[in-house]
Amino acid sequence: MLEGLKHNLLSKNNIVSLIAASAVVGSMVSSIVVPSHIAMANPGASMSVNPETQAVDPGDTFALSAYIWSDEDTMSAQTGLRFDPDVLECLSVANGGYYSGGLQIPTNPNIDNDNGEVEVTMVGLLGAAQGPGEGDFLVYEFEALQDGVANIELLDVIISNADGQAIGDLTVNNGQVVVGTPPLSDLVVIEKLESWIEEGVSYNVNYTVENQGQSNASASTTSINIDDGQSMSDSVGELAPGDTHSAIVGPFNFSTPSDTITVTADSAGVVDESNENNNTMDNDLYYATSSASGDTPVVGSVPPTFVEITVPGQLDIPLEQGETNVVQSTVEIESNQPWQLNASDEKTANKGHMTNADASNVLANSLKVQGDAALADLETGGMIDQDAGDKSASIELQQYVEYTDLPDEYGITVTFTVLGML
């Protein structure tokens, strides 16, 4: 009969109660299986991890309990338990005494420290029901293994009333153990760039946030704020260490002469981070404008601001098949104002691709130019750097050569343009 009772106890779809025949050697214990779809008894019971949270150090031995509260008579209860086996090791399980003198099944519950689970365990009375009250149902002893946060989850919880029916309004409260100093996440905005929708009128903000910490970062919100009061937000899902989230947010209206744009990761402060002071990246966006008045063109006049550029001469790049071939150089910029450096290919046919002299052979992949701020694909061209004042701007030309590309001499002219941002 005990084996039959244990089988019913471990079935998720069955509710088990005990009925005692006699508390003597050889006494019979029978089980009543109550289908889970029947109407539940009057409400009023809970089982909770007690204490709900506690802090210990690696190597500590400590206890927690599955704690019962009920506002009506009960005959039995059961629960299993799940924990993080990388952080904790369960040493023992014992009757907590709420059902004093009750029968425990199984007597020695299986503890699986590889997977972090303790077998569902039941304790039931062999006589009169336990009156309303509260107390420790089962007590679990643990050892803390290493720094971390271990969630404690009660499984397959059932509390039966005096008639052997499961109490319907049952609340289950799980817990948490913090061991030592657990690793934390760290959300950092690693990239931010504006792209014009209509030049000088509206734009989008492109950004990337990375979890540079050592634990998962829960779902959060990134805010994008403009100094004229415009504001938008973007939802970021859970990020494991090293994972990134990129998004394009907009449109924003441009306010002459410039906008200050601030992107803040975890703007609501819901993620516990190792560094709470590196969530923000900001910059000023300018739009290059010029104007003239009168009927007489002005030729050779000196503007109030200036920008000059000196580009490299011919660059030789090795073209090995099956590799990304690179050559590095610098573009010299002199300016007394903020500027933006663009790279492009001005030809119309085979735009962005290296060709032989008569364009009968064309490399399959386009040439890319990496600057200090961004990477531009010469099929479309684009911004590679932005700064203010004089600078020796580093550039790297990148050309991938397929095995199917034909041996030949190839060339391309890269146009570098620097725009002064008024």
Image (spheres, rainbow, N blue to C red):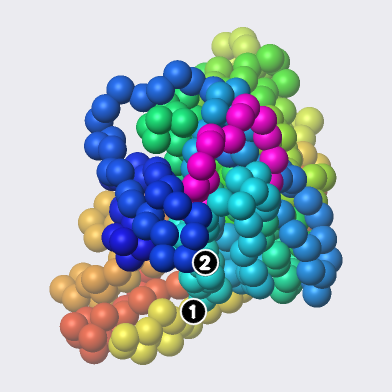
Q: Which residue is mark 1?
A: 326
The CA distance from mark 2 to mark 1 is: 70 Å
Q: Secondary structure at mark 1?
A: strand
Rendered position, 141 above or below 185: below
Q: Secondary structure at mark 2?
A: loop
Q: Which residue is mark 2?
A: 107
Please name the residue shown 39% across and 35% down the image: 164
Out of 82 and 262, give the one closest to the viewer: 82
Tell me the quarter of the picture where residue 300 sits: top right
Please name the residue shown 80% across and 74% down the image: 59
Residue 416 in percent (x, y) is at: 53, 55
Q: Dividing the image into 4 quarters, which one contains the C terminus?
A: top right
Out of 85 and 224, give the one closest to the viewer: 85
One can see residue 28 in this view: yes
Task: Name the kind of residue labelled 2 in the image.
Answer: Thr
Out of 182 and 270, give the one closest to the viewer: 182
Residue 107 in percent (x, y) is at: 52, 66
Do tag 2 and tag 1 residues touch (Cβ < 8 Å)? no
State the extent of the magenta-drawn residues as a range. 122-138
Q: Is residue 397 left or right of residue 337?
A: left
Question: Per the image, is 323 magenta?
Answer: no
Please name the residue shown 52% across and 51% down the image: 123
Task: Name the kind of residue labelled 1 in the image.
Answer: Val
Residue 258 in percent (x, y) is at: 69, 25
Please name the residue shown 48% across and 82% down the image: 316
Counting residues from the start of the chain, the first of labels 2 and 1 encountered is: 2
Rendered position, 131 above or below 346: above
Q: Residues within 10 Å of mark 1 (few under 14, many from 20)?
A: some
One can see residue 383 in this view: no
Q: Is residue 352 left or right of residue 147?
A: left
Question: Per the image, is 127 magenta?
Answer: yes
